[in-house]
Amino acid sequence: MAELFKKHIKNRDYILDKPVKQTDFLQFTPATISGVVNSSESVINPTMNPGQSNMITVKPNIWTPSDTLIRLSNTKKYKPIFRGFADSVEIGDSVLITMIGGEGFYIGPINVGNSPTSVTDNNLVNDITNDKNEVTSDDMSGKSSINSNITHRNRLTKEFNVDLDDPTNTLKRKKHPVTGRDVFTDILTDMTMEGRYGNSINIGSRNIFPHIFISNGRDGGQTTESINDSSIFGMIEFGTISQHFNREQLDDIDYEFKLADESIADVKNSIKGTYRQAVGRGNSIGGEDDTDIDTTIYGFDKPQTFLNSERITINARKENLFLSAFQHIHLGSGNTMTFSTSKNTLFNTADTFIVNSPKVKIGSQVDEETEPLVLGDTLKDKLDELCTAIDGLITALNSHTHPSPAGPTGPPVAPFQPNAQAISSVKGALQEILSTQNRTT
């Protein structure tokens, strides 16, 4: 079986700066996939050989040349031509096949519909069964039933973004005749890798500023990544999150990205509310609050990374998890926040540790298992009043007289004087029961 065309080049002494007399060409032949090895239990992999993963069998289609040097066999298996990459294929997809050193390889599927989904082009799928080019449908049995009902998806597009594509206002702009928005004559396209079902990796840029977006779970008619995709991870060099996703809608209403803890119906506390306070930004108690907290949080336009999804799980399976920030760390939730450990919990702060809550319980969440805390200043005042009352009682006892048959008795010889001195000493030391570090309400 021949694998190569050999053609003599006349009147040409150099190819790629090397003197040659002839050149060799790989022949790529159009064909239609008839079988796919996607697991060890695939029908066309009876030996259950894992080394056959992503290999295919093919059959001719109407574009398969009759004089091809590759003689097609319905049992010959073809490998992906690239070692570390294989595109998603299914029965009925069109590919290009070739032979190298007796081994079969394929590239594809061919982008017949310019869509990452399964787009059937009958011109490429229909089989040639006789000289009259009659089409058979039986040969298509085994085609994936999953993809038969999927929504057609367009490829990702790169819409013009005036703020990011032309931040210095130097490019020539035009008004689009339909939308009325400013557009440019041309911008660079992005490098993209797209899956069948609305997922993609976008390695691109705005102006000279690079970005990477990994998106999963876009709607069928969606042609750009969205902050409201099922999951999206982004690395941005320049611009705010809202500038990169500036045409967002949620439930047919214009939407601008905001943190989830302030997206609930009844917000009582949030990162925005806490960060606005002076202490929340590392300043002293009584310092000036942030008067434009929205810009502080959402107006950040320098290098940043974000992850947005329904649920996010970070799990250090065998070792440690480290969260560190040069400035501040903010944790917020629209409902409950819990911290659990099987051993110790340690908080070290160099300045102030503040807990603002209507109710604080330490030791147990069951009232019957705990006792109320006392208020230091109030306790001191009450004990001071008690000492004063006791001291007055002792004074009265020390000067007390009472009637007798011989007449009134004289005052006692101050039998409670030592007690008075002890009470005075206790009263003078009451200030010592107050903590110089910790306070509560």
Image (cartoon, rainbow, N blue to C red):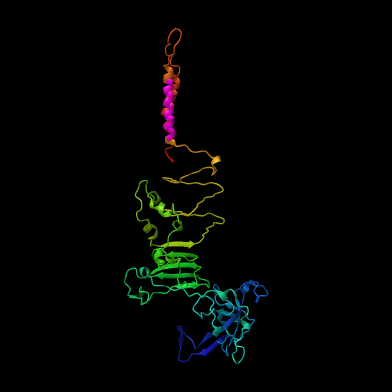
- Nearer to us in this view, 48 or 308: 308
Q: Main secondary structure of the magenta part?
A: helix
Query: Quick check: is 60 in the magenta stretch?
Result: no
Relative vertical location of residue 172 with respect to residue 9 in this rendering, above or below? above
The residue nearer to you, when weighing 328 against 21, is 328
Check the picture and name the quadrant holding the N terminus: bottom right
Q: How many numbered marks have been drawn onto this rendered protein structure?
A: 0
Residue 390 in magenta stretch: yes
x and y, in percent, of residue 49 in the image: 65, 73
| Residue 29 placement, left or right of 42 | left
In the figure, 338 relative to 11: above or below? Answer: above
- The residue drawn where x is 47% and y is 62% is 307
The extreme top residue here reads 406
Name the quadrant containing residue 426: top left
Q: Quadrant of residue 393?
A: top left
- Please indicate whether residue 136 sits to the left or right of residue 423 in the image: right
Residue 429 in view here: no
Residue 364 percent across, percent down from the top left: 54, 43
Left or right side of 188 for 344:
right
Residue 367 lies, in percent from the top left, at 54, 41
- Quadrant occupied by the C terminus: top left
Q: Is residue 137 visible?
A: yes
- Residue 248 in the image: state x and y as whole percent: 42, 67
User: Depth check: 393 or 1 in front?
Assistant: 393
Q: Which is nearer the eye, 15 or 55?
A: 55
Q: Specify start and end residues of the magenta stretch as a single range.
A: 378-394
